[in-house]
Image (cartoon, rainbow, N blue to C red):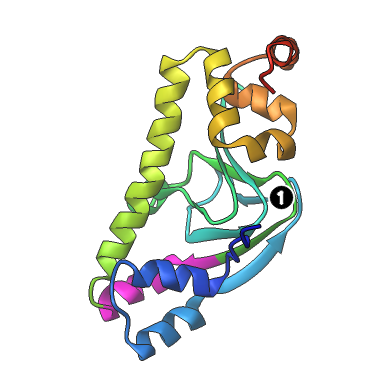
Amino acid sequence: MAKSKSFNQEYILSEIKNIIPLKESEEKLIREAFKQKSISAKEHILTTSQNCEFEYFIQKGILRNYYIIDDKEIISHFSIEGEWASDYSSIFTKKKSELNIQAIEPTNLIYLSLADVEQFNQIIIGWEKVGKLFFELQHYKREKDLKQRISLSPEQRYITLLKRRPELINRVPLYMIAQYLGMQPESLSRMRQRLAKNGIS
C-alpha cells in the first residue's frame, strides 16, 4: 500500500524548491514565518467583513468557499489536504472579501501572513515566480469548477465529482454537495438513488 503524503512544512518547502532554489538561510526564514492553527468545524478563517491577510495551507481537513447572494449560500469550491485557500481578489485589491471560507470538519492549517510574503518578495530571489505559480494553480482549479458548473448538467457535475474528488462525497454533508451542484438536497438524493441502480455511486 502506498504511503500517504504528510502535508507539513517540509512538504511546502519541497514544493517551493521544485520551483526555485533556496539557500539555507532562506529556508530558515520561511520555516520561521510559517504559523499553525487548528479550527473547529463551522469555524471561519475569512468572512465578508474582513480583508484577506493570510494564505492558508491545509494540513488536515476540508474548507468550503462560499458567497452569499440574495441571502442564499452559493458554494464555489472545496479545498482539502495539500491545497491552499485564500481570497486573492481581496489580497490584490486590498478590499474586504466577498468570499467566506469555513471549515467543514476540524481542520489543521499552516499559514503565511501577507507581510511575510512581501518580505520574501524583497529578500528571496525568484519568490514572485512561486507566488505566480501558486496563484495560477488555484485560479485554474476555480475556473475549472466554474466552467463545469456552467457547461454540465447537475447529474454530469455529480458524476465528474465522483470521478475526480470522490473523498468529498464521504466527508462533505450532502446538503453542501447539493448547494455546490446547484440542486435541492431532495433532488440530489433521488439522483443518487437512480445512479446507484445503474452501478454509479
Residue 90 rendering spot, x and y as whole percentages: 41, 48
Residue 14 sits above or below residue 177 on the image: below
Q: Identify the element where label 1 is drawn.
A: loop
Left or right? Give the position of 140 relative to 41. Answer: left
Q: On the image, which quarter does residue 70 sit in? A: top right
Q: Amino acid at mark 1?
A: Glu
Residue identified by numbered label 1: 43
**Which residue corresponds to the image point at 69% horizontal and 23% vertical from the top-left?**
201
Q: Which residues are magenta?
A: 111-124
Q: What residue is rendered at 66% in x and 57% in y?
A: 1
102 relative to 148 in the view: left or right: right
Residue for point 43% across, 71% down:
14
28 sits left or right of 47 in the view? left
User: Which of the two residues, 35 or 193, is positioned nearer the viewer here?
Assistant: 193
Residue at image point 53% right, 60% down: 57
Name the spot of residue 21 as percent of width and height, x first.
29, 77
> Compared to 134, does 186 lie above or below?
above
Q: Where on the picture, by quarter, is residue 27?
A: bottom left
Does the magenta run of residues contain 112?
Answer: yes
Q: Of 179 and 166, which appears nearest the observer?
A: 166
Residue 77: % across, % down: 53, 36
Is 192 above or below relative to 64? Answer: above
